[in-house]
Image (cartoon, rainbow, N blue to C red):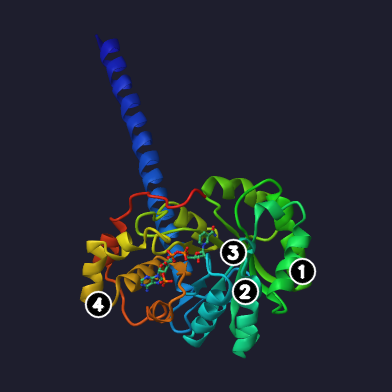
Amino acid sequence: MKKKIFFVICFLVIIFIGFSIYFILDSKKENNKIMDNKLDELQKEKIKANFNFETKTVKLNSGYEMPLNGLGTYSLTGDTCYNAVSSALKSGVRLIDTAYMYENEAEIGKAIRDSQIPREDIFVITKIYPSQFDEPEKAIEMALEKLDIDYIDMMLLHHPGDGDVKAYKAMEQYVKKGKIRSIGLSNWYIEELEEFLPQVNITPALVQNEIHPYYQENDVIPYIQNLGIVVQGWYPFGGRGHTSELLNDSTITAIAKDHNVSAAQVILRWNLQKGVVVIPGSSNPNHIKENTDIYDFKLTDEEMKKMNSLNRDEKHDWY
Ligand SMILES: NC(=O)c1ccc[n+]([C@@H]2O[C@H](COP(=O)([O-])OP(=O)(O)OC[C@H]3O[C@@H](n4cnc5c(N)ncnc54)[C@H](OP(=O)(O)O)[C@@H]3O)[C@@H](O)[C@H]2O)c1
């Protein structure tokens, strides 16, 4: 009988010790999770803190400052492009986004030179296309020649593709030569970044991806930001063919009404408050001006939540 009681007590003690160890380890795990989340928040704050709303610039990991808002030039060519860029520069825009594929680098370079604005005050992003990855040096030289503005502030690989590591390494060499100041990627998501980053020497300064209220990339943005890389969004208004739906969205127009601003301004401001740089496209001088007036109002946490609830994971382009 005594033996039986002894075994029962031993059994209960073992169970008790087992549970205690389990609870201690579990609470440690929970604490670690809380710590990780706190660190994530701190890191995000750090990235957002790099957004200087006074100077309207962000400090890149390359050490250079980049404006928080710019002009996108996709589908603008010839005189339309020259006039849009000239108008943007007159409105105080100092960031211009172009690409080999947009076939407008020459017009952009000319508008910049004609503006008489000191070169150092303007930040130009261009991109090389996967079809150019075979001969990246040729592609970079071509961009430098077409733009003809002495150096390129930021060059991106337009999409992942065969030879992208080789092309990126060529851009790294041009950084050493001082002909490109910062380099980055476009249309790279978590999986692509995980595979790509260990193969290159210079951490990208920027990743440019599709981001708008209907396609928010809420997992990708913090992932990129936590790497110390600035995120820039393309198609902020959903891209041509989708802008009317976004700019007339009742949630967005209601917020706009409360702040006495336009729906476009609300979308741009929402991006900035998420730590995302904006490059809306426009050839309309009034829109271009309007798209720069996004620093005199602030969305509340509640409004940010409402904007975030609009996400539909609805991508408007294939890449
Ligand atoms: N890396 C990539 O793969 C990639 C892909 C696509 C685009 N991008 C870049 O991202 C930029 C932005 O994208 P996007 O230009 O195609 O599309 P978007 O900025 O989403 O929308 C441009 C459209 O919005 C209109 N718009 C602009 N401001 C407005 C305002 N204040 N009120 C009402 N309408 C306004 C423009 O018309 P108006 O001309 O009449 O103002 C134009 O039709 C591109 O220009 C390009 O530089 C990059």
Which residue is located at x 78 percent, y 61 percent?
A: 137
> Which residue in the protein does label 1 denote?
176
Disc 3 marks a residue whose amino acid type is Tyr
Q: Residue 12 is drawn in which quadrant?
A: top left
Please give left or right for residue 270 compared with residue 66 in the image: left
Say above or below: 60 vs 22: below
Q: Nearer the viewer, residue 75 or 239?
A: 75
> Which residue in the protein does label 4 denote?
259
Q: Which mark is residue 243?
A: none
Helix, strand or loop at label 3? It is helix
Helix, strand or loop at label 1? It is helix
Which residue is located at x 61 percent, y 82 percent?
A: 112
Disc 4 marks a residue whose amino acid type is His
Residue 223 location (% of width, % of height): 48, 54
Helix, strand or loop at label 2? It is loop
> Which residue in the protein does label 2 denote?
63
Mark 4 to mark 2: distance in Å?
A: 35 Å
Specify the farthest residue to the bottom: 116
Residue 56 location (% of width, % of height): 47, 80
Quarter, ligand 1 = bottom left
